[in-house]
Amino acid sequence: MIRRYELSQSQWERIAHLLPGKAGDPGRHAADNRLFVHGVLWILRNGARWSDLPPRYGKYKTLHRRFGRWADRGVWEKVFAALIKDPSNDYVMLDASLVKAHQQAATGKKGATKTRRCGVPEED
């Protein structure tokens, strides 16, 4: 049974070969890339904090650290590039939300912090 926001078998087959940690890849083999991807999708689709991740996906700190490593290595960009090339694109979702800011929000402070990666918590 596919849970809400999880990939079907055909969707998983489209990206499985692009992910690190397969047999034959150098280094350690991933325990379960599919469960990890489902955890990331849960976080991104719900807009929740990493600490709110349901336990069925594993430890949230482990998933967050792995998400960051994959982002640094360009794994997500590879997956997105492969999905964009697919002519059927039945699974592509567009976000057409509009965010308005107050007019005073346009001015930034000197020495403002640099842009963060998606999913990385802010520093205190």
Image (tube, rainbow, N blue to C red):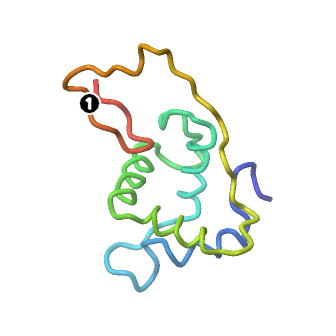
Residue closer to the observer: 19 or 74: 74
Residue closer to the observer: 93 or 27: 93
Name of the residue lying farthest toward the right: 1
When asked about the image quadrant of residue 106, the answer is: top left
Q: Quadrant of the C terminus?
A: top left
Can you give x and y, in whole percent of width and height, for residue 61 in the image? 40, 43
* Numbered disc total: 1
| Residue at 45% across, 63% down | 77
* Callout 1 amino acid: Thr
| Residue at 69% across, 61% down | 7
| Residue at 33% across, 58% down | 72
| Residue at 31% across, 75% down | 27
Q: Quadrant of the N terminus?
A: bottom right
Q: Is residue 26 above or below residue 109?
A: below
Name of the residue lying farthest toward the left: 111
Can you give x and y, in whole percent of width and height, for residue 13 in the image? 65, 75
Can you give x and y, in whole percent of width and height, for residue 54 in the image? 59, 40
Relative side of 62 to 52, left or right: left
Q: Is residue 50 above or below residue 88?
A: above
**Which residue in the protein does label 1 denote?**
113
Relative side of 52 to 25, left or right: right
